[in-house]
Amino acid sequence: MENTYIKRETYLQKIIDRMDNGEVKIITGPRRCGKSWLLKRIFRDYLLASGVESDNIIIVSFDLDDEEEIYGDLTQRDTLKDFLYSRITNANANYYVILDEVQEVEGFERIVNGLNAKDNVDVYITGSNSHFLSSDIRTIFRGRGDEIRVYPLSFNEFCSNRTEPVSELWKEYYTYGGMPALLHHRTPEQKMAYLQRLWDKTYIDDVVERNHVKNREALSSLADALCSSIGSLTNPSRISNVLQSVQKTKICPETVNNYIEYLEDAFLFEGAKRFNIKGNKYFESIKKYYAVDVGLRNAKLNFRQQEITHIMENVIYNELRMRGYSVDVGLVENREMRDGKMAYVQYEIDFIAQNGMEKHYIQSAYKLDGEEKKEQELRSFRKIDDSFRKIVIVGDDIATYTDNKGIVYMGLFQFLKSGI
């Protein structure tokens, strides 16, 4: 449907910037987030509009069976190689090869590296598991892999071609999230059922099969626990205790850690490390976890826990990651007098967002109603003595302004539409 064609211009531009750079372009992200559409429709349309012949755009999708009746089982390495090389017939023409969900092919890296070695072939692959397509990129592609991470729709993309008031769009977005296929579902019941099917029939099944998980119920319970605790500091031992005491699921911390890694590898959650700003060091044992999509998070919990403060924080985290920032959780330790003696007091910063030399300290504050709340949000900023930008993102739709201490106040919608 044409009205659902969101062009995802940010990602398209990232691909265009990398065209013909001699590296394999690796498009990663969770299943159903729009990777295939980005390459097979949006990027293909761009190539055709740029004058590339359709025969020079070679697309193979490994999670579909359409091609098998004609070409044989293309998940078999030799069959795939024969097919691809039979299509690349003109040494003087440029070819664009798109391999969708390529991790389904055992030994795919040899074919990809062989194609990439040809001067007239530009290779693009997608995958939904970071173990194959993120962690090991340098090894698999001999240092010639260039990753582009794709997320579900941002709020700005979600609002494309929509005319409803922004407050209504925001409520829909923070409830159901930004999975692109939701645009085909009209009723709340359809949207809820779709998101829950994704969890049960796509994500959990995929993680169980790929990692040979023996205790599916424990994995699902762990996903529930992560969804319940978004934006809260935690570690495997703490999660193990919660699972045993609340959900009556016995699972040791080591297994919890493994399962978390599986869910992160599937791009369903991201962990933000805790960073001591004054001490300039990480706390390795404790993180905050965020869901890659708040609609998926809500669906996993059957839409029971709609805490807008935590959901807003999760949306801000995802937006920063979509915009290319690395994101840590900040901690400032300050030596102060407490109860008649000196002690180290810890102050939290929601996010430290960094992109190259650019760095921002960010607090997420759904409401700043009253001086006490405002002081609570600003106290940690006042303990930081460097000159990087300090920003408070407020749930109210306010105009951006800077106070006399240099702290920037920005409305949530302004941030989601225009960034920082």
Image: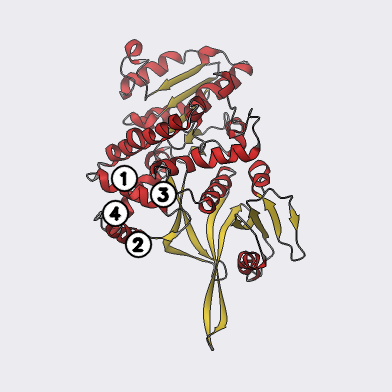
Model colouring: secondary structure
Q: Pinpoint residue 287: horizontal percent, then vertical percent.
A: 44, 59
The quadrant of the image that shows the N terminus is: top right
Amino acid type of disc 3?
Cys
Q: Quick one: label 1 or label 3, which is nearer the N terminus?
A: 1
Q: What residue is pinned by disc 2?
A: 238
Amino acid type of disc 1?
Ser
Residue at 30% in and 38% down: 210
In the rendered image, the residue lying farthest to the right is 404
Q: What residue is pinned by disc 4?
A: 247
Judge by depth and name the residue closer to the eye, 13 or 339: 339
Q: Which mark is residue 227?
A: 3
From the viewer's perspective, is residue 402 above or below residue 156?
Answer: below
Instruction: Find numbered disc 1 in the image and state the secondary structure of the residue it sits on.
Output: helix
Decide: few, some or many residues near mark 1? Use Cα within 10 Å; few <14, some 14-19, many ≥20: some
Q: What residue is pinned by disc 1?
A: 220
